[in-house]
Image (spheres, rainbow, N blue to C red):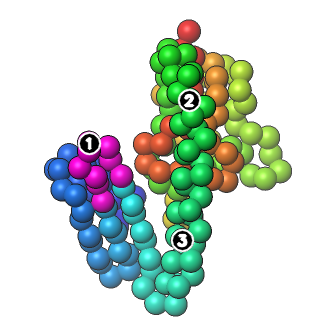
Amino acid sequence: MELKEIQNLIKFVAKSGASEVKLEMDDIKITIKTSSDEKETTIVQQIPMGGMQPQMQGHQQMQQPAAPTQEAPAATQDAPAADDDSKYITVKSPIIGTFYRKPSPDKPAFIEVGDSIKEGDVLCVIEAMKLFNEIESEVSGKIVKVLVDDSSPVEFDQPLFLVDPS
């Protein structure tokens, strides 16, 4: 199943109002869950059938406890600054994967806070299923804030950067 098909499936499930969808194919297992309070929660698990399954389950368990600790401080910090952030454009992740600010460990970051960007500039790469996808800017402006740590897992539609369009 291609990444684009998974993204379309997530969007379809969110719009349909279903609370949970499970899809099992030859080599992958996908579970998409949404809560009923209009706030979307999506869980996608891709588990290769066979010898890799226990290793992937352990990796999934390591990621889940880290998410609440990362989100809780952000919620308290962003609450007073919510009005300030409203004038900025949020660049969001188009895919699920691992966020990297640099093209490789020995190279400088694509962009830093304060850098001016234009449409088409590469902002970061997101690794998904061993493929490194360059994420290009769809807006021009100045980078105000990087919202994700380097080498962190990101969700579909998760905010990555704040851009001042002025």
Nearer-N-terminus badge (2/3): 3
User: Distance between the Cα atoms at labels 2 and 3?
Assistant: 27 Å
Q: Is residue 38 magenta?
A: yes
Residue type, mark 1 in image: Glu
- Tell me, for residue 38, which label it has, or none: 1
* Among numbered discs 1 and 3, the one appearing first in the sequence: 1
Q: Which residues are magenta?
A: 33-41
Q: Secondary structure at mark 1?
A: loop
Relative to residue 18, is residue 37 depicted above or below? Answer: above
Q: Which mark is residue 83?
A: none
Determine which of the numbered discs, if any, sits on residue 78 in the image. Answer: 2
**Which amino acid lies under the numbered mark 3 shown in the image of this protein?**
Gln
In the image, residue 102 lies in the stretch drawn in magenta: no
> Regarding mark 2 in the picture, which secondary structure is present there?
helix
Q: Residue at x 64, y 23 (%)?
A: 144
Circle nearer the N terminus (2, 1): 1
Asked if one can make out residue 73 in the rendered structure from this viewpoint, the answer is yes
Q: Circle 3 is placed at which residue position?
A: 61
Taking the spot 23% from the left edge, 49% from the top edge, the residue there is 36
